[in-house]
Amino acid sequence: MAVRTIEHVTDDIDGSEDAEHVSFSFDGVDYVIDLSAANKAELADALSLYIGHATKVTGAAPKRAPGRSTSGVVSDAKAIRAWAEENDVEVPARGRIPGAVVEQWKASRA
């Protein structure tokens, strides 16, 4: 028996069929929306003035301040894990430290 799966992408604005995924970023936030060709052209027209005056960013990721992680706690990972062990709080030995554990650690220092 053969199975055939067909995916239909529907426009998020007007519900029309044969839409495509369109991604864009604004103010540091990435977005994805499903748009028909007409609505994609309308979005492009609306943004064209700004795109025409903007600088295209390619390649490397945005620069961050030296020594800073995206979560701001990596440099404290050893201290958090030591605190967690002393206080019988479960935390993975490696990898990401759950936010709830970080918050408990911060509260204990306040």
Image (cartoon, helix red, strand yellow):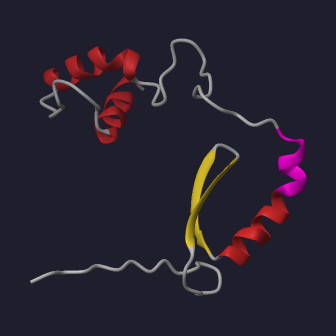
Q: Give the residue at the far left of this rendering.
A: 1
| Magenta span main SS | helix
Please tell me which residue is depicted at 82% across the width and 58% down the height of the picture.
47
Name the side, left or right, on which 41 lies relative to 53.
left
Within the magenta stretch, is there residue 28?
no
Report the front residue among 6 and 28: 6
Q: How many numbered circles are shown?
A: 0
Viewer-closest of 37 and 79 = 37
Rendered location of residue 1, percent (x, y)? 9, 84
Q: Residue furthest front?
A: 2
Instruction: Give the residue at x 21% y 17%.
Output: 82
Q: Is residue 52 magenta?
A: yes
Which segment is the magenta one? Answer: 48-54
Residue drawn at (15%, 21%) of the image: 86
Instruction: Judge whether 43 appears above or below 83 on screen.
Output: below
Q: Quadrant of residue 39?
A: bottom right
* Residue drawn 42% across the image and 26% down it: 110
Residue lying furthest top in this view? 66
Q: Is residue 5 above or below residue 65?
A: below
Dividing the picture into quadrants, the one containing residue 24 is: bottom right
Residue 74 at x, y = what percent? 38, 21
Decide: is 48 above or below 108. Answer: below
Residue nearest the observer in this picture, 12 or 69:
12
Where residue 78 appears, as percent x and y from the top left, is: 27, 15
Q: Indicate the position of residue 13 as horizontal and vertical percent values.
A: 64, 80
- Left or right, 78 with respect to 68, comes to left
